[in-house]
């Protein structure tokens, strides 16, 4: 089957919800076999995640995630502001969430969950960290934790993090430096 034989054509759409973080749309589409169907899509402005390493330790943030009703330990991350580049967002988020800035290197860009959202995640490696804090967002209550790089890799390999970007980011960086 050729790629064009799998394309779905948008016929019409409606916005079901528009909030501060995302927009929910329902589209009517024509499937490759001509049948009409509907697709619900969460539109997201994109995000960054930062694997920040200092003195063979990775900086992680602990925060409560309302959607899953639990705390997570994850790499610093955040949503892109309008017209903000992924690099600028990564620098800002690292400073807001950890107090550090560093040399940024792009690691990967991927869709987080292409089955229902267009969210794109940009991962960066931050090194040569220096203290240069920004005030955190008013709605963020974050604790900074450091664990050794070897322990972070081991936790990622053993699925001890419950956050996909953290697992992927650590494993991608490990593959680059080993």
Image (tube, rainbow, N blue to C red):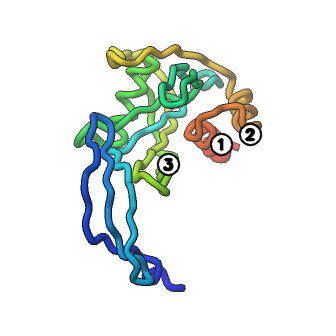
Check disc 1: other Cα within 10 Å, few if <14, some if 14-19, many if 20+. Answer: some
Considering the image in quadrants, where does the C terminus appear? top right
Q: Sequence order check: which comes first, mark 2 or mark 1?
A: 2
The residue that disc 3 covers is 112
Where is residue 130? Give x, y as percent. Answer: 45, 19
Quadrant hosting residue 90: top left
Q: Nearer the viewer, mark 1 or mark 3?
A: 3
> Of helix, strand and loop, which one carries label 2?
helix
The residue nearer to you, when weighing 143 against 117, is 117
> Of helix, strand and loop, which one carries label 1?
helix
> How far apart are the alpha carbons under marks 1 and 3?
16 Å
Q: Sequence order check: which comes first, mark 2 or mark 3?
A: 3
At 45% from the left edge and 32% from the top edge, which residue is drawn? 77
167 lies left or right of 17:
right
Could you tell me if the residues under marks 2 and 1 are in contact, i.e. CB atoms within 8 Å? yes
Q: Sequence order check: which comes first, mark 1 or mark 3?
A: 3
Q: Which mark is residue 171?
A: 1
Where is residue 12? Give x, y as percent. Answer: 25, 67
> How far apart are the alpha carbons under marks 2 and 1?
8 Å
At 57% from the left edge and 21% from the top edge, which residue is drawn? 71
The residue that disc 2 covers is 157
151 lies left or right of 85:
right
Where is residue 19? Give x, y as percent. Answer: 27, 37
Q: Is residue 166 above or below residue 15?
A: above
Q: Nearer the viewer, mark 2 or mark 1?
A: 2
> Of helix, strand and loop, which one carries label 3?
loop
Q: Nearer the viewer, mark 2 or mark 3?
A: 3
106 lies left or right of 20:
right
The residue nearer to you, when weighing 59 against 18, is 18
């Amino acid at each position: 089957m050729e790629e064009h034989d799998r394309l779905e054509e948008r016929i019409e759409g409606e916005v079901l919800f528009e909030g501060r973080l995302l927009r929910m749309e329902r589209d009517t589409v024509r499937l490759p076999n001509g049948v009409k169907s509907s697709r619900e899509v969460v539109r997201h402005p994109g995000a960054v995640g930062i694997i920040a390493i200092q003195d063979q330790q990775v900086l992680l943030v602990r925060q409560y995630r309302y959607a899953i009703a639990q705390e997570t330990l994850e790499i610093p991350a955040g949503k892109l502001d309008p017209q903000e580049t992924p690099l600028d967002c990564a620098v800002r988020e690292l400073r807001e969430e950890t107090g550090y800035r560093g040399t940024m290197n792009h690691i990967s860009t991927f869709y987080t969950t292409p089955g229902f959202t267009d969210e794109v995640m940009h991962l960066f490696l931050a090194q040569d960290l220096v203290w240069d804090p920004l005030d955190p967002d008013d709605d963020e209550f974050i604790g900074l934790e450091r664990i050794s790089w070897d322990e972070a890799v081991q936790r990622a390999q053993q699925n001890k993090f419950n956050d996909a970007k953290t697992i992927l980011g650590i494993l991608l960086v490990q593959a680059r430096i080993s």
